[in-house]
Amino acid sequence: MKAAGKPVFNIDYAADEFNIEDAYLQNSRYGYIAEVSPDRALKVIPAKVNSQNIFDVDSLKDAKNFLPLLNPQEFATKEEYLAAIAATDYDLVIVDLFYGGAPLSAEDVDKLKRKKSGGRRLVFAYMSVGEANDFRYYWQKEWSEQPPAFLADKNEYWNSWHVYYWQDAWRNILYGSDDAYLDRIMAAGFDGAFLDTIDTWQFFSEKEKLTKDK
């Protein structure tokens, strides 16, 4: 990735100050843009920004730091949530498209596009492409008893379901219509999308291997 001129972003997890500083140091040695979070659920804003940057950020190559804040449940209201993010100097923030079951509006997203210091920053939306969640807007109540063909085994760790991501029915949920996930992200004015669970192919590969071994 670096040889191709692409920036590499990395999320690490550490709780105590020594390990946090050590993680940033190791990432710096490799030239990675890192965020070391004390919380694996990514629901808190760290006390300080690593590699402070006062300049405008118009592309990922300009970013020196980033904040993945994927779970907004720690904030009592949407206004409190947006204000907390707006009061930071992160170059890139990654948030969920939804707060309290409703998607963020273009006005909401626009409030996040300025750092506390005044500089421009990027705002990305989280989007899971390899797993489905029963709390998402697209989930149908009857799926729990009569799952659609694209739902595979449950991922008990994250309480989600692996999906046969190559099936058209799942692809249609992700993009291609006004109600599709990516189209909603674009309509809200996000600068990009953070694609999660792209490693689902490994689950199916391992499952196929185990089947063959039997």
Image (cartoon, rainbow, N blue to C red):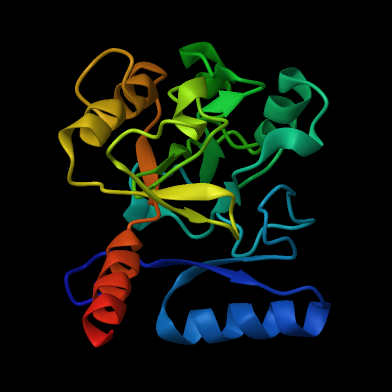
- Residue 64 in percent (x, y) is at 49, 60
172 sits left or right of 134 in the view: left
* Residue at 22% over, 27% down: 172
In-front residue for pair 12/176: 176
Q: Which of 150 and 63 is in front in this view?
A: 150
Question: Looking at the image, can residue 91 be seen?
Answer: no
Quadrant where the image shows the C terminus: bottom left
- Identify which residue, 99 or 93, lies in the foreground: 99
Quarter of the view holding residue 183: top left
Q: Which residue is found at the position 18% from the left and 40% from the top?
A: 167
Q: Would you say 179 lies left or right of 102 here?
A: left
What residue lies at 35% left-to-right and 52% top-to-bottom? 60
Q: Residue 121, how many percent across, how many down?
A: 48, 39
For the N terminus, which image quadrant?
A: bottom left
Q: Where is residue 195 in the image (x, y as percent from the top left)?
A: 37, 48
**In front of the other: 43 or 121:** 43
